[in-house]
Amino acid sequence: MLDVSDCIKINLKPVMSKLKIAVIQYDIVWENLSENIQRIIEIVKNSERADIYVLPEMFNTGFTNDVASMAENLDGDTISTIKNLAKEQNAAICGSIILNENDNYFNSFLFIKPDGEIVRYDKRHLFKMGGEADMFTKGNERVICNYKDVRFLLQVCYDLRFPVWSRNRNDYDAIIYIANWPASRQEIFKTLLKARAIENQALVIAANRIGTDGNNINYEGGSCFVDAKGVVVNACNQNSEEVIFHNFDLSWQNTFRKDFPAWQDADDFSIIFSD
C-alpha cells in the first residue's frame, strides 16, 4: 500500500523547465575588437532574453592569423566586457577568441557564466589549410560544461570533421559548434551538423558568421539547431544577421535516448594524442 507521504513527494517532484538558447549570426568586422564587442552588446541587449547566447568563432576579430596583435589574456577587455554583460543579462555567453597564455596562442572557446565562472576549451583540430596550425597551439582536453543541469560539449569549427572527438558516451546532452565556416563548403557544414546530432543522439547548436573577411573569404551563415533525430528545428536565413532561439527540452531527448538506446551499442575506443 502506498503511503500518503509518498504521494506528496511524487506530486511535488520538480519538473525541469526548458533551457532557452540563442544563436547570434552576424558579420564580424575584420580585426576590430572594440566595434565587434559593441555590436554584440547591442544585439544581446535588444534581443529576446535567453539563458545562453552563442557567438561564432573568433567573434571579436574574425578568423585572422595576426595572432600577436589580436590576442588577449584572460584579464583582457573582451573577456571583462563579456563577463559584465553576462552578469547584467543573468545569462551565459560563449564564443571563441585568440588567447595568449605564456606566449602560446590558443583559439579558445570560452563559456562565460553570469557568476563570472569561465569554462575554457582550446580548439583541438587546427585548420592547417588556413595556416592556423602554424600559428596556434592545439588543445588536448575534451571539455564538457555543465550549465543549469545541461551538459554541453564545447567544439570549434574544424573539430566538426572529426567524429571521434565528439563521440557521446552518455556524458553530455548537447554540442555547441562555433565556426567561421566558408560559403564554399556550406553543404559540408550542414551535412556534418546533422550527422553529429544523429550519431550522438544529442542537440547540436551551431553558430557561424556571415559577410566577407579580410582574406576575401565569404561566409553565408548556416547557424542552426539540430535535434537528436537530425531535424533542423530552427535556422538562420542565409546571409542574414539575426538571432534565433530554441527551447531545449532535455526530458524529450532523454526519453528518445531511453526508447532508442543506440548509444549503448557504440564501440569502445581510446583517443591517442599526437603532435
Image: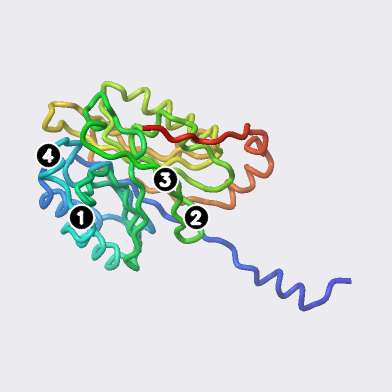
Q: Residues within 10 Å of mark 3 (few under 14, many from 20)?
A: few
Which sits earlier in the primary sequence, circle 4 or circle 2? Answer: 4
List x then y, in percent, for residue 100.
Answer: 21, 49
Measured Cα–Cα span from mark 3 to mark 2: 20 Å
**What is the x, y in percent for residue 155?**
38, 41
Q: Which residue is mark 3?
A: 141
Q: Which mark is residue 150?
A: 2
| Pointer 4 residue | 30
Labels 3 and 1: the sequence-earlier one:
1
Q: Amino acid at mark 3?
A: Glu
Q: Position of residue 45 (x, y in %)?
A: 23, 59
Residue topped by disc 1: 73
In this view, the residue in front, 201 or 89, is 201
Q: Nearer the viewer, mark 2 or mark 1?
A: 1
Q: 10 Å neighbourhood of mark 4: few (<14), some, or many (≥20)?
A: some
> Could you say whether the residue bearing mark 1 is in a helix, strand or loop?
loop
**On the rendered structure, is 31 left or right of 201?**
left
The residue at the point 53 percent across, 51 percent down is 249
First in sequence: mark 2 or mark 1? 1
* Mark 2 closeness class: few <14, some 14–19, many ≥20 residues within 10 Å: some
In the image, what residue type sits under mark 4? Trp
Q: How many circles with numbers are drawn on the protein? A: 4
Image quarter where the C terminus lies is top left
Contact between marks 4 and 3 (CB within 8 A): the answer is: no
Residue 218 in which image quadrant: top left
Quarter of the figure with the N terminus:
bottom right
Compared to 252, does 90 lie above or below? below
Under mark 2, the amino acid is Val
